[in-house]
Image (cartoon, grey):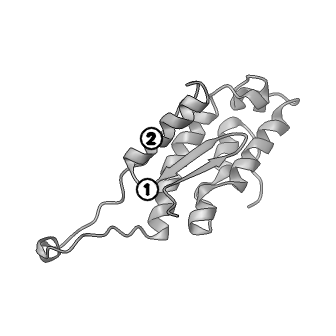
Amino acid sequence: MTTVARVTLTSAQLMVESDSPERLNAVKHRLAAAFGFSLHFRGETLTPPARQMSVNRLMSGQPLTVIVTAEEDRALLKTFLEKAYLEWSDQPHLALGGQTPRHAAASSSTRGKVGALIDEMARHDPGLSRTGRTAFNYNVLRAHVGLDEVPE
């Protein structure tokens, strides 16, 4: 059996990783159909890091393989997560009664829920499963919504 896609579902996010852009689109369409087309996908990373290839390597006739190091993978994830999470802070959230995380963090009655959602995101950071280290500094997100930093 070959793994062609990985779906990670938490209370705050649904992440889909795939072996090709075509398969990613197919998975996204099936998920959207399963959820009654009420699912909206934001942000995609489809381009591996640029590589410098020598003319000899390009002319060798051998297939080219792109190897993404753990640090490059972590940097790609960081860029992707920064955009997705900073957008997340201004999107209404069901767990927050339809409030945006930024607005909910301003209220003493819902501030803890926002912190708990961010803690959950940190526990499920895709960098942990891919590189063994978190790819995103969740204190940046905490500051973005107006919460205090927590020690790492």
Label 2: few (<14), some (14–19) or many (≥20) C-alpha neighbours in 10 Å = few
Disc 2 residue type (three-letter): Ala
Label 1: few (<14), some (14–19) or many (≥20) C-alpha neighbours in 10 Å = few
Residue shown at 42% from the left, 47% from the top: 23
Residue shown at 50% from the left, 48% from the top: 80
* Residue 112: x %, y % from top left: 84, 39
In the image: residue 86, left or right of residue 11? left
Instruction: Residue lying at the far right in this picture: please name it.
Output: 109
Judge whether 103 appears above or below 111 on screen: above
Disc 1 residue type (three-letter): Asp
Judge whether 48 appears above or below 83 on screen: below
Q: Residue tagged by mark 1?
A: 19
Judge whether 141 appears above or below 122 on screen: above
- Residue at disc 1, secondary structure: loop
As drawn, the label of residue 49 is none
As drawn, the label of residue 26 is 2
Name the residue nearer the viewer: 136 or 146. 136
In the image: residue 136, left or right of residue 27? right
* Residue 117: x %, y % from top left: 75, 42
Residue shown at 88% from the left, 29% from the top: 109
Q: Quadrant of residue 118?
A: top right
Residue 133 visible in rendering: yes
Residue shown at 48% from the left, 56% from the top: 4
Residues under numbered marks 2 and 1 in contact, where contact means CB atoms less than 8 Å apart: no
Instruction: Residue lying at the far front in this picture: please name it.
Output: 1
Judge whether 47 appears above or below 12 on screen: below
* Residue 147: x %, y % from top left: 75, 41
Name the residue nearer the viewer: 94 or 38. 38
- Residue at disc 2, secondary structure: helix
Q: Earlier in the sequence, mark 2 or mark 1?
A: 1
* Residue 67: x %, y % from top left: 37, 70
- Mark 2 vs mark 1, foreground winner is 2
